[in-house]
Structures are given as C-alpha cells and as structure tokens.
Amino acid sequence: MSPNLKQAAELIRQGQCVGMPTETVYGLAGDALNPKALARIFEIKERPTFDPLILHISPKILSRLNEWVTFKNPKQEVTFKKLSGKFWPGALTILFQKKPIVPDLATSGLPEVAIRMPNHPVAQALIDEVDRPLAAPSANKFGSISPTTSSHVLKELGSRVTLVLNGGSSLIGVESTVIRIHDDSIEILRPGGVSQEELTACTGLRVNQSTSSHGTLSASPGTLDNHYAPKTKLFLIPTSLLGAPIQDLKNWVWDLKKKHGAKKIAGIMLSASHRSKFETGSQLLADKWFSLSEKNQPTEIAHSLFAILREVDESGVDLIIAEPVTEKSGLWPAIEDRLKKASTKR
Ligand code: TXA
Ligand code: MG
C-alpha cells in the first residue's frame, strides 16, 4: 500500500477529511459514521447542512450494507439487486431507508441515505483500508464547479485539507446519477453518469425524472439552481437562435454585453465541429472560443466539462456564452443539467 493511502486512512480514522479520486468527480471523504468528521466536511465545503451526503462503499464492504440501511419491501430489494449487479461499482447513487447508526448529519435529518460504490481503485482501496463507508461530497466549495483532478481540489481546498490523493483525471467527469427506487418505477433525482435508458434496460421499469421544480429542496437537496457555477457570469445561447440567421445571435450577444457592461467574452461550444454556427466572417461572436470535444461525443464533453469551465473562468473574460444541449438521451441530460446550473439566471 502506498504511504499516502496509509496516511489518508489514518487521517480518516482520526475524524479528518481527505481528497479522494473517483471516476465521476473528486470527493472530500470522511468517516460516514463519525458525526465529527461529517461536521468537518460541511465546514470545509461551506455547505449548508440541509444538503445531504453520499456514502461510498467498496465491493469488500457491500455484504455489510444491511448494517446501514433497510429495504422498504422485497420489490425494492429485487430492483436494487438488478441495479447494483449492473452498475456497481459505478456512477449510480441509490437512496435507501437509513438505520439509526447512520448519523442524521449525513442525511440532513432525512429518513433516506444515499449510497454509491465508486469504480476507482484508489477510492476502493481507501474504503477497504478504513473498512467503513466514507461520506464524500464533491471536493469543491458549495456552489462552485466540481473538481475532476487533484490539482482542482488543491487549488480550491488545499489550505483546508491535509491530504489529497491523486488518482488522475476523473474518467466520467460529471457526478453520479441519484435515484430512488419505487415499487414499480425509478425516480431520477439528479441525472448523471448512468443514463435513463440504461436504467430502463436493466430493470424493465418506468424511469422518471424527478418532477420537483428547480430551486426547491423537495427532490434532491443538492439540485439547487446555480450549483456548479463559475464566478464569471455564464449565459446559455437560446436554442431558438441556433437555426436562426446569424444576425439574431449577434444581436443577442450585443444586448448581453451591453446589459452586463462586458468587454471581453468567451464562448464554449459543445464540439469543435460546430464552429461554423458561431462564425460571422470577420466579426467573431466571442473573443475566445473553447470546445468541449472534437466531434460532439457526449463522453468526451462530460469528461472535459468541469475542467473547461474552470479554465474559461480563469481566462480573464467578463462574460461567458455557451452552446446549449439539444439532444435528450444517454449522457446528454447530465451535461445539460450541469450547463444549466452553471448559467446565470437573468
Ligand atoms: O459522483 C458523485 O456522486 C460525487 C462523487 C464524489 O461520488 N459526489 C457528489 O456528492 O456529487 P455531492 O454531495 O456533491 O452531491 C450529492 C447529491 C446532492 O444532490 C444531494 O442532494 C443528493 O446527492 N443526496 C444525497 N443524499 C440524499 C438524500 N438522502 N435524499 C435526497 N438526495 C440526496
Ligand atoms: Mg457537489
């Protein structure tokens, strides 16, 4: 075992927190059964305590799941078995009824607890070594962009955490899908790395997006508006302008610049192959362009999304415009959700 991993496990046993790589985004991990460690997580992140945490387990401790949760009924357990067989380890977080041993702080006082088994060797090794579930929200300050590399974590929380384990850049790049299993359906509280279609194919059940309106706490408390937001104002280009004459888009950009007193603006396009949509001969719609992928591949876009948002945010512009997502399947809803939450409400 690497000395870092040993040290990380020791820190966690003492009730401290460490940066932990996962395949979705980096987490800020602490002992999920120690209220002091949980309080420290909220403190480091400046996260309101009404936003509950995800508990991370490994294949080794899966057999102890019933120490922490109960199933509502046999139907729920059958669906869980199918889902965990297919998507664990992976980017799927499932809600269960919690047992009293799980501190109320982990669930913000809610009766359900969220659990995920990350598919990252370093995360699994750390959980194995501590031999307990680890609570781990994304390792960013509340409301800011989730980190997908250890240097993102160090930059944002470096002075507040003793150790950040390096596990390379997170392969998926957007957070896990959070679901609740009902008797005859599945409810998606947060779209993420596992798609609606995959959930349907695996279970044969109806899969619904949670219908609660954004900005309320009724569905998944972390699904607040203006979550994953850069510091620079970001506006999504209205979909209606994509097929319209380029002059309409130019007017929209012009109005936006005027309204916000912006001089220098950056544009984010989903794919480098979309460049022509945003080019107007000699007049460019933005001073700098960033593309999230070469050929509009959602896996590539998800992987680079948060890193590029950080890069654009630090590029010295006054305003950011971004190409909206129009596709609906696979990873697209997760990408659309994160872009919408990164955007400024007008
Ligand atoms: O991919 C991920 O899920 C990453 C990595 C580190 O595992 N973690 C992550 O955690 O995104 P966090 O805390 O940034 O987001 C957790 C989401 C929030 O939207 C929260 O509201 C929801 O999960 N959640 C957690 N427990 C819940 C509960 N008991 N009921 C409803 N939603 C819950
Ligand atoms: Mg987060």
Image: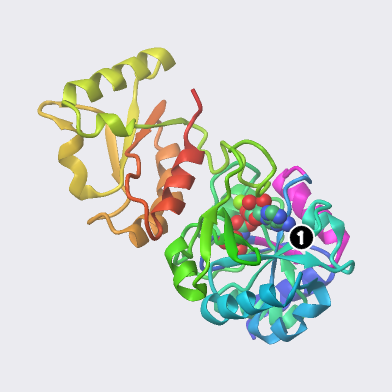
Residue 179 or 322: which is nearer the viewer? Answer: 179
Name the residue carrying label 1. Answer: 112
Q: In which quarter of the image is residue 339?
A: top left
Q: Which residue is drawn at 62% across and 74% down?
A: 117
Query: Taking 316 as reference, is 139 above or below it?
Result: below
| Quarter of the rendering occupied by the N terminus | bottom right
Q: Quadrant of residue 260?
A: top left
Q: Are there few (<14), some (14-19), or many (20+) residues within 10 Å of tag 1?
A: many
Instruction: Tell me if the residue at label 1 has its CB under 8 Å from ligand 1.
Output: yes
- Name the outermost residue toward the front: 184
Q: Is residue 329 left or right of residue 72?
A: left
What's the residue type where badge 1 is placed?
Answer: Glu
Q: Is residue 66 visible?
A: yes
- Was residue 36 drawn as part of the magenta stretch in this picture? yes
**Residue 51's x, y, as percent?**
72, 48
Query: Taking 269 as reference, is 63 above or below it?
Result: below
Q: Is residue 26 visible?
A: no
Q: What element carries label 1?
A: strand
**Residue 319's x, y, as percent?**
40, 27
Color scheme of the displayed model:
rainbow
Q: Is residue 205 left or right of residue 16?
A: left
Which span of residues is magenta-colored? Answer: 28-48
Residue 97 or 48: which is nearer the viewer? Answer: 97
**Residue 192's x, y, as percent?**
50, 58
